């Protein structure tokens, strides 16, 4: 792939702690309910959403690539609708993270071909692993082979099982220059904890999932991430965690996954305003 655009040159990024540039965005952008929530103007069609999204944010995490394999022609059409400075993170398809298909190596090849049009606008490939993917020997071997297969792409790994929160894992991610995802999610036993560990000084990567404990346990995806962060919660997170992250990295991305009723873009803008008025800015 071609050299990637320096994040320092991207409009909308905040410079924090002197030299760390941070972008804010959401997980996905194509939600018709965001028209009802007034994030998109009334009457906005799905095909117009990315263009409108780009007026507010300079990065998005593509989550549709988890549900279905990315196709190069569709990705190329999407890239043409975004500003040239815009950055995409792309979630790895579930056949390689949750279903572990027998032909995952072939799936990996198709995925690399599918996201190729992102070119220098690719921020990172997100490898999100499921809650039951614990740190067994076979799972460690699988993850190592998967990361080998993704070599050459900027990578971020999100664990859900707490057994991966050990120094040896962090050291291996650091050796591979892979970003460990910092999560904000409900405090439930067994889940991967919120950490300030930065394994790739080029990029820290944060995902906000909401703190809806009952929804998380419901098994319903909409209820799971139905959460509206308060001003105090976002300010508290910023004060406790963000300073530690920005002092260890040259750049960072922060995505909100609580898309229900337009909460994600509202919370992302709220956090950016809080951080922009803080002592970190």
Image: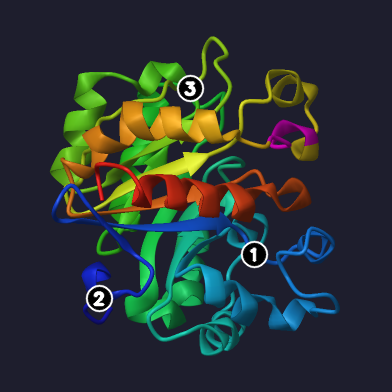
Q: Position of residue 148 (x, y in %)?
A: 28, 51
Q: Residue furthest top?
A: 189
Write the residue at 16% across / 41% down.
247
Q: Which residue is mark 3?
A: 161
Mark 2 secondary-structure assignment: helix
Q: Nearer the viewer, mark 1 or mark 2?
A: 2
Q: Residues within 10 Å of mark 1 (few under 14, many from 20)?
A: many
Q: Which residue is mark 1?
A: 29
Say whether marks 1 and 2 touch (CB < 8 Å).
no
Mark 3 secondary-structure assignment: loop
Question: Residue 104 bears which disc, if any?
Answer: none
Q: Residues within 10 Å of mark 2 (few under 14, many from 20)?
A: few
> Which picture quadrant has residue 173?
top left
Q: Residues within 10 Å of mark 3 (few under 14, many from 20)?
A: some
- Residue 120 vertical position relative to residue 140 in the rendered view, above or below: below
Between residues 271 and 61, which one lies in front from this camera angle? 271
- Specify whether 196 is left or right of 157: left
* Magenta-drawn stretch contains 217: no
- Specify whether 262 is left or right of 62: right
Say whether marks 1 and 3 touch (CB < 8 Å).
no
Q: What stretch of residues is rendered in magenta?
A: 223-227
Mark 1 and mark 2 lie on one chain; the one further toward the N terminus is 2
Write the residue at 35% across / 75% down.
11
Q: Nearer the viewer, mark 1 or mark 3?
A: 1
Q: Which residue is mark 2?
A: 9
Distance between the Cα atoms at labels 1 and 3? 27 Å
* Residue 79 in view (yes/no): yes
Q: Position of residue 152 (x, y in %)?
A: 25, 64
Q: Position of residue 71 (x, y in %)?
A: 59, 77
């Amino acid at each position: 792939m071609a050299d990637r655009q320096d994040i320092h040159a991207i409009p909308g990024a905040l410079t924090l702690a002197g030299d760390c540039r941070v972008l804010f965005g959401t997980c996905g952008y194509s939600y018709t309910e965001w028209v009802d929530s007034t994030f998109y103007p009334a009457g906005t069609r799905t095909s117009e959403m990315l263009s409108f999204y780009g007026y507010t944010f300079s990065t998005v995490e593509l989550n549709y690539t988890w549900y279905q394999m990315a196709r190069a022609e569709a990705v190329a059409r999407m890239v043409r609708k975004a500003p040239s400075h815009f950055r995409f993170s792309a979630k790895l398809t579930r056949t390689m993270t949750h279903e572990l298909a027998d032909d995952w190596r072939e799936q990996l090849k198709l995925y690399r071909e599918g996201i190729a049009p992102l070119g220098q606008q690719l921020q990172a490939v997100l490898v999100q692993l499921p809650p039951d993917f614990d740190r067994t020997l076979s799972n460690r071997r699988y993850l190592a082979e998967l990361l080998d297969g993704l070599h050459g792409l900027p990578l971020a790994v999100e664990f859900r099982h707490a057994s991966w929160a050990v120094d040896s894992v962090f050291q291996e991610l650091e050796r591979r220059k892979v970003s460990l995802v910092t999560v904000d999610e409900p405090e439930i036993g067994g889940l991967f904890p919120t950490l300030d560990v930065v394994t790739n000084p080029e990029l820290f990567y944060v995902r906000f999932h909401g703190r809806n404990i009952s929804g998380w346990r419901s098994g319903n995806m909409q209820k799971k991430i139905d959460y509206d962060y308060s001003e105090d919660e976002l300010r508290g997170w910023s004060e406790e965690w963000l300073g530690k992250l920005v002092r260890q990295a040259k750049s960072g991305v922060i995505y909100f996954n609580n898309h229900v009723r337009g909460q994600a873009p509202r919370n992302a803008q709220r956090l950016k305003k809080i951080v922009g008025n803080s002592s970190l800015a």
